[in-house]
């Protein structure tokens, strides 16, 4: 039977197995998108097969991989598909998603895709302004010796320059904030060099991640070889907040803007 609405909204993210942050980030972003496109039926998809499998085993919850989701939309008879990525950069996960979508470009009447959070130069300036706003709050009690430090995932993909581009903007605009990654550049030792150079002693850690899940709880704030413990070993006074980027209305608004500017792939 042909679907009544004929249009589907497919929101694709990496995914998370941490339900506390999922509700505040992924699902909050999805809600903004669902409210914006009420004439579309909503579907969710994740690009992490490992997390999809974990949820199925642990909670018996089924989240579809992008190819499975698109197959389902075909089966249900949708003609138009609006896809919004919740990935932060045009990196490995986003490109994997786009390669899958490319296989379906002639199977629907229309496919439109909204770009990741950091794509245009305007996006970088926009996110830098968010970091500035948050960092001013973090450092207001000790402007000279304190700073916010943002931990990103990092990547070996060519899009790794995205993180350095944000870090450069922070430095260029004299914002009391630094960015380092778990897997890529800038590394934590690069950041520590500048912390020492700038006389920073008090640090408030924040995740530069859509969700405050495993990486935020362990690689950033954990008690075993984390950003927190490494900085404490260097004599820094460290506090942290487990708040994913998806919790900020500022970020949700940028994602919504990208959805409104979605481009045709078929």
Image (cartoon, helix red, strand yellow):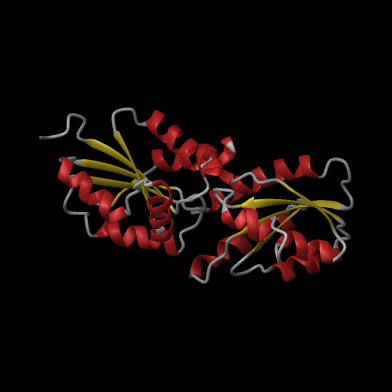
- Front residue of 241/104: it is 241
Q: Is residue 32 above or below residue 70?
A: above
Left or right relative to 88: residue 128:
right
* The quarter of the displayed image where residue 24 is located: top right
- Which residue corresponds to the image point at 31% horizontal and 62% vertical from the top-left? 99
Left or right relative to 58: residue 236:
right
How far across and how far down the image is residue 11, in percent?
38, 44
How far across and how far down the image is residue 160, in percent?
55, 66
How far across and how far down the image is residue 179, in percent?
68, 59
- Which residue corresponds to the image point at 71% horizontal and 41% vertical from the top-left? 133
- Front residue of 3/65: it is 65
Left or right relative to 111: residue 213:
right
- Which residue corresponds to the image point at 57% horizontal and 66% vertical from the top-left? 161
Image quadrant for the N terminus? Answer: top left
* Residue extending farthest left: 1
How far across and how far down the image is residue 89, in percent?
50, 57
Q: Is residue 25 above or below residue 39?
A: below
Q: Is residue 68 above or below residue 194?
A: above
**Count of marks, rendered view:** 0
- Which residue corresponds to the image point at 50% horizontal and 65% vertical from the top-left? 159
């Amino acid at each position: 039977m042909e679907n009544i609405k004929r249009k589907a909204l497919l929101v694709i993210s990496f995914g998370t197995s941490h339900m506390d942050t999922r509700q505040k980030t992924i699902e909050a972003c999805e809600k903004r998108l669902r409210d914006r496109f009420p004439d579309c039926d909503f579907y969710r998809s994740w690009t992490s097969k490992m997390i999809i499998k974990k949820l199925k085993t642990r909670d018996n919850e089924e989240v579809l991989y992008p190819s499975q989701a698109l197959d389902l939309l075909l089966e249900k008879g949708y003609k138009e598909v609006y896809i919004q990525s919740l990935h932060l950069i045009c990196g490995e996960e986003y490109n994997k998603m786009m390669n899958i979508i490319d296989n379906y470009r002639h199977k629907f009447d229309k496919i439109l895709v909204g770009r990741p959070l950091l794509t245009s130069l305007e996006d970088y300036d926009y996110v830098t302004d968010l970091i500035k706003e948050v960092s001013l709050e973090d450092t207001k009690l000790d402007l000279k010796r304190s700073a916010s430090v943002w931990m990103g995932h990092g990547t070996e993909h060519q899009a790794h320059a995205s993180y350095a581009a944000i870090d450069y903007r922070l430095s260029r605009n004299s914002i009391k904030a630094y960015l380092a990654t778990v897997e890529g550049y800038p590394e934590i030792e690069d950041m520590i060099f500048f912390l020492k150079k700038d006389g920073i002693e008090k640090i408030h850690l924040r995740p530069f991640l859509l969700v405050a899940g495993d990486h935020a709880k362990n690689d950033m704030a954990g008690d075993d070889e984390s950003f927190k413990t490494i900085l404490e070993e260097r004599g820094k006074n460290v506090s942290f907040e487990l708040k994913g980027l998806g919790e900020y209305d500022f970020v949700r608004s940028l994602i919504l803007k990208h959805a409104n500017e979605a481009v045709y792939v078929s």
